[in-house]
Image (cartoon, rainbow, N blue to C red):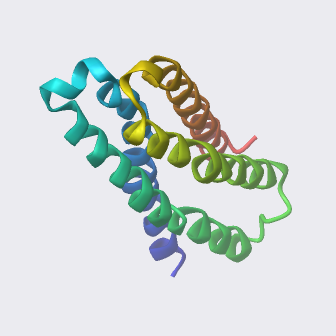
Amino acid sequence: MNDVYLFIHVATAIMFIGAVMVATSLFPRYAAADDAAEGGRAVAVAMHRITQLYGLLALICPAAGAILAVRYGILGETWIWLSIVLVAVAWLMLLLKIIPQQEKMLTAESAGLSKLRGQAAAFAGVFNLLWFVVLILMYARP
């Protein structure tokens, strides 16, 4: 049964977390006013939907990981708790900063988009960095 949970953990990390990382990174570029005339708005809306839906589905990954940690008896390991904290920070950032910022950009006037674009790119960068650190912790198990 551990193999099934491990498969779910890894597969959802790749499919859902990876997709959210890409969508949050691409969104600012396509939500910008310059790209709107070239179909950028449609891409931005699609990236926003991916961020919302796959962000929710990405919760399967840490849930499967928590089950694995309990089954393997490693829940007390420091790297597990550090990963849990980083995942919680990333998910809160997604819910409280990234998704609202995207919604704001989709309804904003062209004049204010450059500042919002920079903020959205920064949020995406920090979000992706958090997940990259979690990946390193999952691989290295320090």
In this view, which residue lies farthest toward the bottom? 1
Quarter the C terminus occupies: top right
State the image coordinates of residue 8 (x, y, percent, origin top left). Answer: 44, 68
Report the residue at 46% width, 50% height from top.
17
Q: How many marks?
A: 0
Report the residue at 42% width, 34% height from top.
108
Residue closer to the observer: 71 or 121: 121
Residue 95 in the image: above or below residue 22: below
Tell me if residue 11 can be seen: no
Report the residue at 46% width, 54% height from top.
13
State the image coordinates of residue 24 (x, y, percent, origin top left). Answer: 43, 38
Tell me if residue 99 can be seen: yes
Q: Name the side, left or right, on which 1 lies relative to 15.
A: right
Residue closer to the observer: 68 or 131: 131
Residue 57 in the image: above or below residue 142: below
In this view, which residue lies farthest toward the left? 38
Determine which quarter of the picture holds residue 88.
bottom right
State the image coordinates of residue 126 (x, y, percent, origin top left). Answer: 61, 30
State the image coordinates of residue 96 (x, y, percent, origin top left). Answer: 64, 50
Determine which quarter of the picture holds residue 16.
bottom left
Report the residue at 72% width, 46% height from top.
86
